[in-house]
Image (cartoon, rainbow, N blue to C red):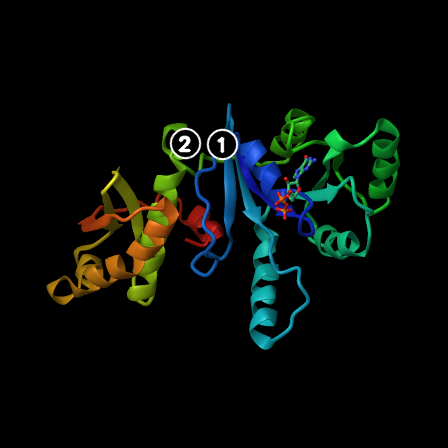
Amino acid sequence: MRSGFVAVAGRPNVGKSTLVNALCGGKVAIVSDKPQTTRRRIRGIVHGDGYQLVLVDLPGFQRPRDPLTEHMQRTVDESLGDVDAVLFVLDGRDRIGAGDRFVAQRVFGLGVPVVIALNKVDRMKPAEIAAQIEVASKLDDFDALHPVSARTGDGLGPLLGDLVELLPEGPAYFPPEQRSDLPLEAQVAELVREKALEVTREEVPHAVSVEVEELGEKVVRAVVYVETASQKQIVVGKGGRVIKEIGVRARPEVEQLLARTIFLELQVKVKERWRRDERMLERLGL
Ligand code: GDP
């Protein structure tokens, strides 16, 4: 079994999101637009035969404008050492220019293998593709370069093959596929978890996990799992005040996600040692 983390990099509009969706084949397990509770945003997980590839975001490419942004950028840089490879996406239809070189500088400075995806070849002539490969090759010392189309799926197999080869041996970090083809439930769980951390002010951050047990038309039922009775006390709060507040904060966002009005039923349960791999969770920022 191989498993690991690949950071997706590239300037805006090159097709990163489209590519991630195509690689995950609609099996994106966790997509949260809220980066503040996880050090690293997971874009998607590719579950394959004998491997699990976690695609993560590589934000912070904008030039720091203020101290907070600068601080965030530093944090991002520090956590970068943890990725096993970088998938560097270029827009083949566009001039490979200063924006790409800015990203390239940081990407190639990480000291991990870089795989370049020259995207959008569905709209390019063979001669154009060849010319752009030539330009892209001069960016730096990459590990592999693949002309691909995130839109049509062209070239994605070989690209994925190369990425998987760069992963170290490791366990499956995420539950197998039957869980991950339910992206909405995972997203709802992530929202609830985020609010739980927010409301408990991170008193129990590493101990909280959330499972959505029912995602109905009108009722959404989720269980907030903690590891000890005292953590349960914190998350429930006096007279249920804390869990109620978690629900109050989570509901509007869940409703927005589902595009409908719902009752959000939250329960807190103790489940000992749900954390199996401390280091993995550390890497995920959970
Ligand atoms: P991101 O900002 O890097 O995440 O880029 P997006 O994934 O949002 O894509 C930016 C635009 O490029 C969108 O309009 C996509 O539909 C388009 N796009 C992405 N991949 C391809 C591709 O392979 N071929 C073509 N023709 N368009 C693409």
Q: Residue 255: percent from the left, percent from the top?
A: 32, 50
Helix, strand or loop status at disc 1 = loop
Residue 84 in sight from this viewpoint: no
Give the farthest residue toward the front: 260
Give the farthest residue toward the bottom: 67
Q: Separation of disc 1 and disc 2 at Cα?
A: 7 Å
Of residue 21 and residue 85, the one placed in the foreground of this image is: 21
Q: Residue 125: percent from the left, percent from the top?
A: 83, 29
The residue at label 1 has a CB less than 8 Å from ligand 1: no
Find out whether the residues at labels 1 and 2 contact each other: C-beta distance under 8 Å: yes
Of residue 123 and residue 59, the one placed in the foreground of this image is: 123
Neighbor class of circle 2 (other Cα within 10 Å; few <14, some 14-19, many 20+) is: some
Quadrant housing residue 115: top right
Horizontally, residue 69 falls left or right of residue 95, namely left
Q: Residue 269: percent from the left, percent from the top?
A: 19, 49
**Which quarter of the rendered image does ligand 1 occupy?**
top right
Q: Earlier in the sequence, mark 1 or mark 2?
A: 1
Residue labelled with disc 2: 181
Q: Residue at x 38, y 34 (%)?
A: 182
Q: Residue at x 47, y 32 (%)?
A: 27
Horizontally, residue 253 falls left or right of residue 168, namely left
Residue labelled with disc 1: 26
